Amino acid sequence: MAGAGMAIAVLTSGGDAQGMNAAVRAVTRMGIYVGAKVFLIYEGYEGLVEGGDNIKQANWLSVSNIIQLGGTVIGSARCKAFTTRAGRLRAARNLVEHGITNLCVIGGDGSLTGADIFRSEWGGLLEELVRDGQISEEVAREKCHLNIVGLVGSIDNDFCGTDMTIGTDSALHRIMEVIDAITTTAQSHQRTFVLEVMGRHCGYLALVSGLASGADWLFIPESPPEDGWEDLMCERLGETRSRGSRLNIIIIAEGAIDRSGKPISSNYVKDLVVKRLGFDTRVTVLGHVQRGGTPSAFDRVLSSKMGMEAVMALLEATPDTPACVVSLSGNQSVRLPLMECVQVTKDVQKAMDEKRFDEAIQLRGRSFENNWNIYKLLAHQKPAQEKSPFSLAILNVGAPAAGMNAAVRSAVRIGICQGHTVYVVNDGFEGLAKGQIREVGWHDVAGWLGRGGSMLGTKRTLPKTCMEKIVENVRKFNIQGLLVIGGFEAYEGVLQLVEARGQYEELCIIMCVIPATISNNVPGTDFSLGSDTAVNAAMESCDRIKQSASGTKRRVFIVETMGGYCGYLSTVTGIAVGADAAYVYEDPFTIHDLKANVEHLTDKMKTDIQRGLVLRNEKCHEHYTTEFLYNLYSSEGKGIFDCRINVLGHLQQGGAPTPFDRNYGTKLGVKAVLWMSEKLQEAYRKGRVFANSGDSACVIGLRKKVVAFSPVTELKKVTDFEHRLPQEQWWLNLRLMLKMLANYQISLTEYISGKMEHVTRRTLSIEKGF
């Protein structure tokens, strides 16, 4: 075993964040998996200093059934003692007594900086302990080096260099739930609401929730409003009302300030609106609600991934490697030098203190800057510089997916900003053939952001069944750009239109596909719009199913998920709920594998955890159906456990979009239309658009960390049309994590470790798409 003889301790410190438990679980299990001893330190640094019962060795079951809990089960405390050398001396003695020289700290920048100081003093602390006769020289030699790895747990997402910190996505879930609830009451009474969200020094939560809710006005500490903002804000709010809106939402970060650095309070904003406009105005301070509740799917998967990577980083650490934090970049794990991140995080604060606000926004990273610019673009209509000669049509194709409406809204608004004529089409390609096409304005898409499903209506019909009529309407409405938001049919449909260009000159126009499907099976992107919402819906159902199984004991649930042949939904849901197995088409399995799974569950029933959860993708095997698995597990488990079936069905397609899907849909809509505008300009000659090159019809998507456009004709070469799948899928390497955390013995050689990267102003300038 790679980790034999190692001892790893894990602690959570600072403010709690949803997902910390998933991280503790992953570190503990991965540590045990590689053969190390793992200790849990209770109550953060306080427990480390106090020692005694606060440091306990963990086993596999110590961290069972905690992945769905918010907060941290091992407790967190602010600790004065650890900030003193005497406190750190006691902490060092406690670690040495347990033979621990590897420490994994889950917390914010303060906690991580503390860990780094502890590490740099380690040698000196041990010398002092030897002098005081508390440990022998031999022990001091043996334990002469302390390895440290950090995971950033902070709902503010205020740590530079990491895309997303643990807890941020869950906090956004809480905020959006509140905004959705408040929107309905505000509409009933024509009220204005001022919502105060957390973020003393960082406006990330306020910014993303403002973008995801289409708020009327936003205050963030990194970009204080211009002097005289009071007049402008009241004018805007009045304008929105006079256009028929029944509510206003103003979002304010708790650390909001004006240009001179004076705090702007939510009550000041409320009194202003009441005094100037006479609107019925209420303040809601979200407070600690944002830290609470169950972690979202993203946070559970992120934390599990980072926890495993943290153990690998400790395994591979040498006395020369700097203390690192484990982070996610796109969907890859990376390691970043801890103090580089802390330095840039401090630089942001310094820039804000010195009123260099533009620089503060740049240091937050390109994604933050992008969010801010897109928010400003979409919040209020600015008259287009000039009318453009182009017309765009927007349609939804395939099955409904959450986030489609967010993409339509932003695409319509950006199209109008650019001066284009924007049409929307009802019922997909069929509607395009039947002429169900109408022009839309800025306010026609107000309030669409938080709506699930597809407001335009969507159908699976492909163009080849009605090509002549589609061409006729493209000509009649003079459509030069087609934006198709949908799943595999959207991609296949655009491919058919491109292949018909030889026959119909009218189809030599600019086309773009925004992948939107819960199955996440469109080539050209790592994430489809709607898959995050579907994973969360499936996860919430599985949480409830697990709870019912915990009550009845000795019960195994077999849960069927959607996804066609694509196993993304069941794999990611499986990781998020700690499933025992997830059967998918891409990872072929035989009767021997099924037998091994049944034996695995039989062993599990002999422990204290007497329940099992097995996920099965709907088309994972022609013969091993859900019914078959149920019969197999029932007969093999006779007398040991009983079985139940659950088919999740269409609840995976429904529901309000998650913050990620609202934000992602909004960004893809904006980027797609900006790209189309550029292409239309290039292809415009003698008063008409003629485009027949491969790159005039693309799929937009997030690949690794960047937004990319891939020509549909190129993607055709890497698509399995029979099973409606891309030939290569990045998420298959997540299956290793699913199996390891479910205690299946697999060789570590397949594990791909994250690379060490550096955090500089240049790396911060790469747009990550979040």
Image (tube, grey):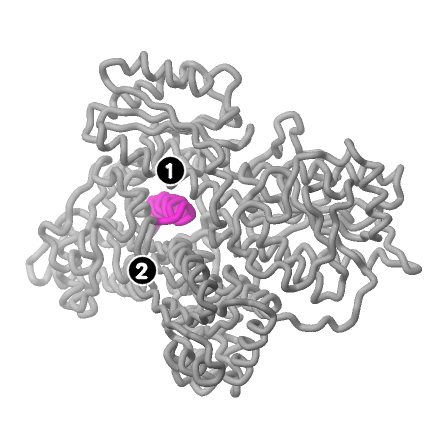
Figure disc tally: 2
Q: Is residue 126 above or below residue 520?
A: below
Say which label, 2 or 1, has the lower sequence index: 2
Cα–Cα gap, marks 2 and 1 = 22 Å
Percent x, y of residue 397? 66, 41
- Mark 2 lies on residue: 289
Percent x, y of residue 16? 28, 58
Residue neighbourhood size for the residue with mark 2, other residues' Cα within 10 Å, grouped as few (<14), some (14–19), many (≥20): some
- Mark 1 lies on residue: 541
Residue neighbourhood size for the residue with mark 1, other residues' Cα within 10 Å, grouped as few (<14), some (14–19), many (≥20): some
In the picture, which quadrant includes the N terminus? top left
Direction from residue 48 to residue 674 in the image, left or right: right
Q: Give the residue displayed 71% in from the left and 48% down from the top.
A: 425
Q: Is residue 182 above or below residue 437?
A: below
Predominant secondary structure in magenta?
helix
Q: Give the residue displayed 35% in from the left and 18% down from the top.
A: 596
Q: Is residue 332 above or below residue 215?
A: above
* Near-viewer residue (270 or 222): 270
First to last magenta residue range = 295-318
SS for callout 1: helix
Q: Residue furthest left?
A: 133
Percent x, y of residue 421? 76, 60
Q: Amino acid at mark 2?
A: Val
Looking at the rendering, which quadrant does residue 338 occupy?
A: bottom left
SS for callout 2: helix
